[in-house]
């Protein structure tokens, strides 16, 4: 392993993790708090989860997890900062951020919307699938 290999690997992982966390923050802040289209566990029908306080707590724990992922990404960025001197490293970091951002939306749509069915993008519409697919394409596949 060369001296630059470890920092460049750290830089790549930092971009992926920071992008993933930013995708989660974007989802949580825009969809959960501003638009209020869903909460993390809104599709869970058990009695305790019908309480909005439980829903907001779950959203808060979700944000805490995104903070932990962002901190890990920030730490790796700090540790791999030597690799930023390489030509094209900044563009590579931006690309990795976009990959992480898109990865969050793919994981969210596939795992949380379709496999676990704990929420959908829009819980207040008759046909949520077109909303899920549109969001997945716009924010999961295009970045």
Image (spheres, grey):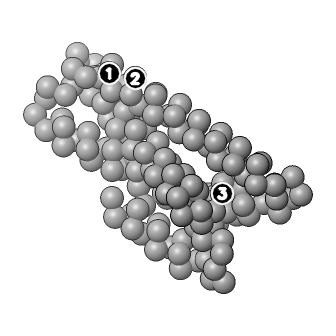
Nearer to me, 98 or 86: 98
Rendered residue at 46%/74% (across/down): 134
Place of residue 79 in the rendered image (x, y in percent of width and height, measured from the top left): 33, 19
Dot 2: element? helix
Cα separation between marks 3 and 1: 33 Å
Question: Which of the 4 quarters of the picture holds residue 80?
Answer: top left
Among all residues in the image, which is located at the extreme left?
Answer: 87
Q: Nearer the viewer, mark 3 or mark 1?
A: 3
Residue 141 is left or right of residue 38, and the answer is left
Q: Are marks 2 and 1 in contact (CB under 8 Å)?
A: yes
136 sits to left or right of 11: right
Q: Position of residue 68 (x, y in %)?
A: 53, 31
Under circle 3, the secondary element is loop
Q: Earlier in the sequence, mark 2 or mark 3?
A: 3
Q: Dot 3: within a 10 Å radius of its alpha carbon, few (fewer than 14), some, or many (20 or more) residues?
A: many
Question: Residue 96 sits in which quadrant?
Answer: top left
Which residue bears the numbered disc 3?
Answer: 39
Q: Are marks 3 and 1 in contact (CB under 8 Å)?
A: no
- Tell me the residue that label 2 is attached to: 75
Q: Which residue is mark 1?
A: 78
Q: Point out the image quarter for the C terminus.
A: bottom left
Q: Residues within 10 Å of mark 2 (few under 14, many from 20)?
A: some
């Amino acid at each position: 392993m060369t001296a630059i290999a470890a920092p460049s690997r750290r830089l790549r992982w930092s971009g992926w993790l920071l992008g993933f966390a930013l995708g989660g923050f974007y989802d949580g802040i825009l969809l959960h708090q501003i638009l209020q289209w869903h909460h993390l566990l809104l599709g869970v029908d058990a009695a305790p989860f019908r309480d909005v306080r439980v829903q907001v707590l779950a959203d808060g724990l979700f944000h805490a997890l995104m903070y932990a992922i962002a901190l890990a990404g920030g730490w790796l960025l700090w540790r791999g900062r030597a690799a930023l001197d390489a030509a094209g490293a900044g563009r590579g970091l931006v690309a990795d951020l976009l990959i992480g951002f898109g990865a969050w939306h793919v994981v969210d749509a596939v795992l949380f919307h379709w496999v676990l069915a704990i929420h959908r993008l829009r819980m207040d519409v008759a046909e949520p699938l077109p909303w899920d697919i549109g969001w997945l394409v716009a924010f999961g596949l295009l970045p």
